[in-house]
Amino acid sequence: MCGIVGVYLKTKKFEKDLGKILSGMLNNMESRGPDSAGFAIYKTENEKKFKYSICLNKLNFDDFRKEIIKKVKKPTINQYSDHIILTTSDEPKKVIKVINSEFTNISLVGYGRSIEIFKQVGNPKDVVKKFNLETFSGSHGIGHTRMATESAITTDGSHPYSTGEDECLVHNGSLSNHNNLRRELKKQGNIFNSENDTEVAAGYVSNSLSKNKSLKDTLISGLKDLDGFYTFITGTRKGFAVVRDEIACKPAVIAETDDYVSIASEFQAMAHLPSVNSAKIFEPEPGIVYSWGN
Amino acid sequence: MELDLKKLKLRSINETLQNLDRKKNERDFKIINPEGSHALCAGLTEDMNINIKGHVGYYCGGMNQKAHITIEGNAGTGVAENMMSGKIHVKGNASQSAGATAHGGLLIIDGDASSRCGISMKGVDIVVKGSVGHMSGFMSQSGNLIVCGDAGEALGDSLYETNIYIKGKVKSLGADCVEKKMDSNHIKKLRKYLKEANIKNLKAESFKRYGSARKLYNFKIDNLSSY
């Protein structure tokens, strides 16, 4: 099953409420995915530096802090439960190398100038509370509640998946050709951290974007290359996009007003949104890419 | 009687409607704040009028018998699924599999219905004032599917004896679905359905009828290589 949600704000009116809106949506999608939950928030401030979203797993925060300040340039570290947001002017190439070589037990869940990602196993209501999602502000956000099918219930198996700078992807469905595609992408230099099918879709998107293809064109070619059932929401720094496979068994509803576009697996996830009853509500058509802000 | 889903639990509302107190003669209900709830008004068996103010989730009015339900909003997957009799009127759009496996009654959708509308329908009459998505009427067995707009790909794939009437364009026909002649009986019947759905601006003669070529009914040795 799985529940996916996303909000893209067209105006600044609800920027401060983004976390509140998204947490309500995730809480309402608990019935579709009780195993784990996660979300990505895009913030507009301080885009000169890079932010690294890290899950510490069992590593002690103070131990991590002590070590990392020696290794990256003037970091600021904000802790949210077992996740931290590390901000530094150091480039991803360097920081990823440091994290992979010096800290073997932590997971880098995403990085970029704008994105912050949090994901963990457990009931969505608990996960949302744990990371204080309600207090977040931002320009757009994407979330996921997981009912595990293709791989184990772990932090690595949770969505969103981020495989490139400021990129993320959530998925409702399952892919059948992910093993072949993973092999292909590995040959081209993509790195994967799990056996999960969705991570392959995220890698496919990153690989294509790195070749300067637009997000829309990437998802159009994905309709041919990704075999399986899916509704995807993908996020980039400037916006987000939605696509359903051509059979369209996996649901999606979009509500659009002058101030925002929201998408969810079911309308009930959006029932609490401001003036949703006067919004334009429609289902994305199968095999058509819908995008905003890109 | 007004039933508010913000104050009452879904289950208690459904139970009230499923176990009507016959001594009270209360037959008109209004449901407010549905907020996309699933299985609202499922399993009703009595004559009653229900007006739902807002959007509903999956399987609204599923298994309905006798009740008349109006949804003043959109409906999620499987509205009127397995309906036996009565009437369900969706004033907005309906999601996929509207009227799936329904045996009887009338389902009216003022907007569009997405994919697989009338899948495996077994006698229900469905009138869609907008368009329907792909694979509508898939494996449908009996009843009438009337679409005032267009139909998506693979209309009526592998259907049995359902009559499908389409006013607009058909993107493609599914396996064993063919266009059929409209005789005076069909026109008469179609007029009746258009009237019931309060459609005044369309003439029954302007629709095209589709049905089964009946070539999949029996095994054909010529098709052996396809299996």
Image (tube, rainbow, N blue to C red):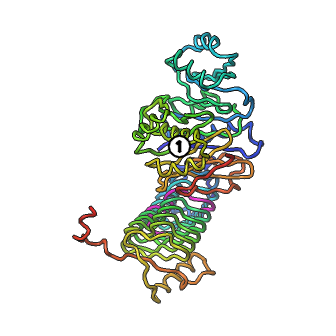
Query: Magenta part mainly helix, strand or loop?
Result: loop
**Residue at the image position 68 percent from the left and 21 percent from the top:** A88
In the rendered image, residue B167, in percent from the top left (x then y), is placed at 55, 77
Q: In this image, A211 relative to A182: left or right?
A: right
**How dense is the environment of label 1, judged by Cα within 10 Å: few (below 14), some, or many (20 and up)?**
many
Query: What residue type is disc 1 on?
Result: Gly
The stretch in magenta equals: B71-85
Which chain contains the residue that carries disc 1?
A: A
| B16 versus A5 height, above or below | below
Extreme residue toward the bottom, this view: B184
A52 in the magenta segment = no
In terms of depth relative to the viewer, which is nearer, A137 or B34?
Answer: A137
Q: Residue at x 55, y 36 (%)?
A: A160
Image spot of residue B106 (x, y percent): 50, 71
- Answer whether residue B11 is visible to the viewer in this image: no
Q: Nearer the viewer, residue A111 or B165?
A: A111
Q: Is residue A264 visible?
A: yes
What is the x, y in percent for residue A117? 60, 31
Asked where in the image residue A15 lies, by quadrant, the reply is: top right
Secondary element under disc 1, as helix, strand or loop, is: strand
| Residue identifier under label 1 | A3
With respect to residue A148, does B146 lie above or below?
A: below
As drawn, B6 above or below B130: above
Determine whether, in the image, residue A175 is placed left or right of residue A259.
Answer: left
- Horizontal side, residue B93 vs residue A238: left or right: left
Counting the numbered discs, the total is 1
In front here: B129 or A218? A218
The quarter of the picture where residue B195 lies is bottom right
